[in-house]
Amino acid sequence: MKIYTKTGDKGETSLFGGKRVPKDTLRIEAYGTVDELNSILGVCRSTNAASEVDAILNELQHDLFVLGADLATPKDGKEVTRISADDISRLERHIDDIEKKLIPLQSFILPGGNRSASMMHFARTISRRAERLVVRLQREEPIGELPVIYLNRLSDLLFVVARWINALGNTPETKWQS
């Protein structure tokens, strides 16, 4: 199988199920940003994160493939595995477990710290952008509520993972000074 098909050369692509749409539609932008998020999580994993962190990031990368397929498949189209309430509950459990290991926040912190944590903060911002796009898509097309909730929870998880990476590396957090 060749990697190029030439079917997108005129600025269109196919949704899962076969419908052709322009490559700049909101749906394509939304799942393209989810793909970008998945890629940056791969970069985060390459920075030699602790095995517990890596296991979570591996889960998230698999989830993001599901979310991408979910967003690439109109509700009236082909049946695919979609993000579920169980996926969201799993993210919440991770957040709760990690927060128990952290010193509670008393003020805002600046994104940063060691390289791994800084990359995780960057991933968090991509997650927020994906969330904003999916919120817009949800207003225009029937995609359900779970993709938005998943991305909202995911960015929260990425924030606490960034803090956890800094804690594991004994890297102090920089408090925001108003």
Image: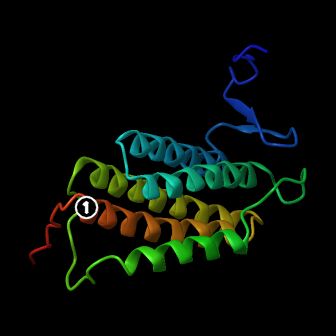
- Name the residue at 73% across, 16% down: 6
**159 with respect to 150 (left or right):** left
Task: From this view, report whether residue 88 is shown above or below residue 78.
Answer: below
Q: Secondary structure at mark 1?
A: helix
* Residue at 17% from the left image edge and 67% from the top image edge: 173
- The relative height of residue 89 versus residue 169 in the rendered view (above or below) is below
Q: Position of residue 65 (x, y in %)?
A: 66, 48
Quarter occupied by the N terminus? top right
Q: Amino acid at mark 1?
A: Asn
Q: From this viewpoint, is residue 137 visible?
A: yes
Q: Which residue is pictured at 43% across the width and 57% down the height?
A: 53
In this picture, residue 106 sits left or right of residue 38 = left
User: Label 1: few (<14), some or many (≥20) within 10 Å?
Assistant: many
Which colour assignment does the render follow?
rainbow
- x and y percent of residue 113 in the render? 20, 57
Residue furthest out toward the top: 2
Residue 10 at x, y = what percent? Answer: 69, 23
Q: According to the image, label 1 marks what residue?
A: 166
Q: How many marks?
A: 1
In this view, 115 is above or below 147: above
Residue lying farthest to the front in this orientation: 51
Residue 26 in view (yes/no): no
Where residue 17 appears, as percent x and y from the top left, is 87, 43
Residue at image position (30%, 49%) is: 116
